[in-house]
Image (cartoon, helix red, strand yellow):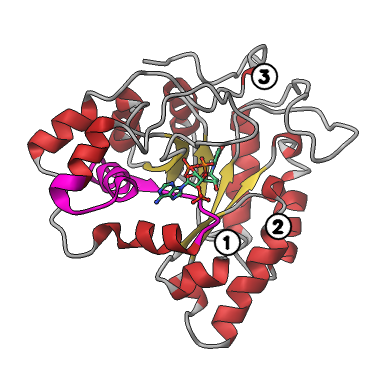
């Protein structure tokens, strides 16, 4: 799928050690570089530091493991996956039942900054950080965070957080763009975004698909959407959202803004008891 994505024009690959996909992503990128389809510098590769590796002595270990898995000398951005430092669990892939570790995010950030100096990553960034946590990082950093990867979609705008990121020069990367339908880990009892009447109406008006309307909307609110699909048809459809089109007009954007329910899709609420649980500033 990654090779197909590159063939079809995708140039950003959102990964993380925890996704367990880095060896396959590395092979796919390597193949495309070898066959001359792209150069390494044409591709923007994101990886993320897992919650159990926040201790400064673990940070380079995690980074080196990711680079080895990817078969690459560097990534383009290395993000702190969550502001939720956790103790190591018996199963290193345990995602849900984790206990809090007493490692401040500022301390982990300092260790991540060293990765830039070592040449392991071109930049460092954040994921799932709220406004006050961003403030704590930017207050005393050597390298500014370049990204905050958070949930953003028409049902969950996060406008104050988007504005805050913009004021700090941080690019928002939007996950859950389609409200992550059929996600086996999440609540099945949710409204469907992709079949919402407003989205369908705008799709008809512009001769586009609902998915393309959502992608274009996210782009117009200055987010970088990282959509996921298992199907080639959707893969092609999603990358074509920008072709032959000036985009949504002001009235369309107003209608899209009215879809906000303020209900987060990804709550990660098994970590609600952590003192750094980030989703307390919701709007
Ligand atoms: N930083 C974090 O903490 C974090 C958290 C969650 C996710 N992420 C990242 O965000 C990425 C996006 O994942 P997500 O699960 O959040 O989901 P999403 O993009 O909101 O939804 C993915 C779902 O949308 C469907 N889909 C894709 N294109 C479509 C189209 N054109 N029309 C209709 N349906 C379409 C897919 O089904 P088909 O397979 O049938 O196309 C899939 O079921 C992940 O891969 C991951 O990289 C990051």
Residue 2 placement (x, y as % from top left): 56, 66
Q: What element carries label 2?
A: helix
Mark positioned earlier in the residue sequence (1 or 3): 1
Q: Is residue 75 left or right of residue 57?
A: left
Residues under labels 2 and 3: Cα distance? 25 Å
Q: In which quarter of the image is residue 92?
A: top right
Circle 1 or circle 3, nearest the eye = 3
Q: Residue 180 carries which label?
A: none
- Residue 220 on the magenta segment: yes
Give the CA separation, mark 2 to mark 1.
9 Å
> Which residue is labeled 1 in the image?
75
Q: Quadrant of the N terminus?
A: bottom right
Earlier sequence position, callout 2 versus callout 3: 2
Q: Which residue occupies the foreground of this view, 17 or 233? A: 233
Q: Is 227 one of the magenta-colored residues?
A: yes
Q: Do the residues labelled 2 and 1 touch (CB within 8 Å)?
A: yes
Instruction: Kindly state the secondary structure of the residue where label 3 is placed.
Output: helix
Residue 241 spot, x, y in % from top left: 28, 57
Identify the mark at residue 66; answer none if there is no mark.
Answer: 2
**Which quadrant would the C terminus be assigned to in this image?**
top left
Residue 139: image x %, image y %? 44, 29
Q: What stretch is highlighted in magenta?
A: 204-231
């Amino acid at each position: 799928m990654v090779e197909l994505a590159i063939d079809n024009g995708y140039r950003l690959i959102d990964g993380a050690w925890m996704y367990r996909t880095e060896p396959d992503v590395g092979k796919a990128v390597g193949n495309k570089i070898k066959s001359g389809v792209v150069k390494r510098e044409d591709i923007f590769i994101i990886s993320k530091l897992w919650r159990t590796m926040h201790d400064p002595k673990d940070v380079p270990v995690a980074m080196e493991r990711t680079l080895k898995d990817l078969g690459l000398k560097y990534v383009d951005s290395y993000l702190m996956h969550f502001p939720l430092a956790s103790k190591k669990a018996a199963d290193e892939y345990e995602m849900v039942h984790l206990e809090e570790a007493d490692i401040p995010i500022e301390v982990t950030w300092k260790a991540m900054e060293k990765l830039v100096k070592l040449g392991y990553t071109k930049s460092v960034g954040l994921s799932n950080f709220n406004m006050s946590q961003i403030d704590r990082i930017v207050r005393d950093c050597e390298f500014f965070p370049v990204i905050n990867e958070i949930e953003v979609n028409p049902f969950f705008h996060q406008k104050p957080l988007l504005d805050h990121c913009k004021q700090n020069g941080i690019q928002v990367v939007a996950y859950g763009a389609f409200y992550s339908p059929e996600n086996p880990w999440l609540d099945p009892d949710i409204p469907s975004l992709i079949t919402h009447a407003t989205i369908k109406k705008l799709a008809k008006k512009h001769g586009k698909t609902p998915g393309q309307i959502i992608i274009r909307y996210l782009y117009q609110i200055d987010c970088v959407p990282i959509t996921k699909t298992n199907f080639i048809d959707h893969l092609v459809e999603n990358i074509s959202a920008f072709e032959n089109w000036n985009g949504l007009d002001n009235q369309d954007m107003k209608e899209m803004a009215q879809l906000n329910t303020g209900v987060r899709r990804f709550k990660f609420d098994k970590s609600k008891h952590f003192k750094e649980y980030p989703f307390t500033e919701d709007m």
